[in-house]
Amino acid sequence: MKFRTNVLPAEQVYAILANERRRHALDGLRSTGGTVTVNELSTLVAGRETGESPPPTRCRESVYTSLVQTHLPKLADAGVIAYDRESQTIELSKGARDVGLYTEILAPGGATWSELYRALGLASLLVVLAALLDVPVVSAVDPVLWTSLALGVFAAASSAQLWVNRSSVLRQLRLR
């Protein structure tokens, strides 16, 4: 296993996230999941800022200018995006994960959703292994039933996450 040594420092992540337009740009890039043009990204960001689809031309032009002159170079210099000035295309790079860790939404109880899923996965694995290894009480229930219960808990957690985050999900769907 190889560990990353080039993690973005917290101060740099905070500087990136300090600007709302950069946060909207990163959210827009995450929601598309691939390579986008500066025009496409400026339309996404302007739509998020105004709540209109399509956004007003003047707002989109203003966003385009600030992205090209300020925000995209800053994100590219930090290693958060890959920005090709010639083709005017942008995509997230490995550094985006470092920034994403600071913006993860919390589950009820204060843990992040990824922490909750890791805990559920570990607990499920341990219970199923205990059933397979004939640990008293646990082995009284069939491992297939334990596995089914674990999958049900994962489905319930996923549904809860969608419910808790429904406003941001609905907002993203409206902007597409």
Image (tube, rainbow, N blue to C red):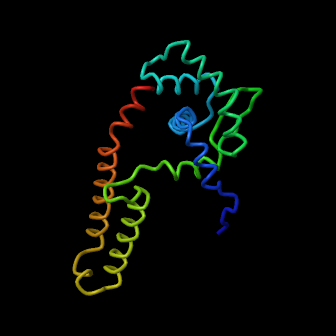
Q: Which quadrant does the N terminus fall into?
A: bottom right
- Residue 69 sits in which quadrant? top right
- Residue 76 sits in which quadrant? top right
Residue 113 lies, with reference to residue 118, above or below; the image says above
Q: Which quadrant does the C terminus fall into?
A: top left
Question: Where is residue 89 drawn, in percent x and y?
Answer: 68, 30
* Viewer-proximal residue among 58 and 54: 58
Residue at the spot 54% in from the left edge and 17% down from the top edge: 59
Residue 58 lies, with reference to residue 171, above or below; the image says above
Q: Which residue lies furthest to the top in this view?
A: 57
Give the left or right position of residue 71, taking residue 48 as reference: right
Residue at the spot 38% in from the left edge and 61% down from the top edge: 116
Give the left or right position of residue 171, taking residue 61 as reference: left
Give the left or right position of residue 129, taking residue 88 as reference: left
Q: Which residue lies furthest to the right in this view?
A: 86
Residue at the spot 30% in from the left edge and 73% down from the top edge: 143
Question: Where is residue 97 drawn, in percent x and y?
Answer: 58, 50
Residue 145 lies, with reference to residue 52, above or below; the image says below
* Viewer-proximal residue among 71 and 168: 71
Residue at the spot 31% in from the left edge and 46% down from the top edge: 164
Question: Where is residue 166 drawn, in percent x and y?
Answer: 33, 39
* Viewer-proximal residue among 110 and 129: 110
Residue 128 lies, with reference to residue 117, above or below; the image says below
Question: Where is residue 19 drawn, in percent x and y?
Answer: 56, 37
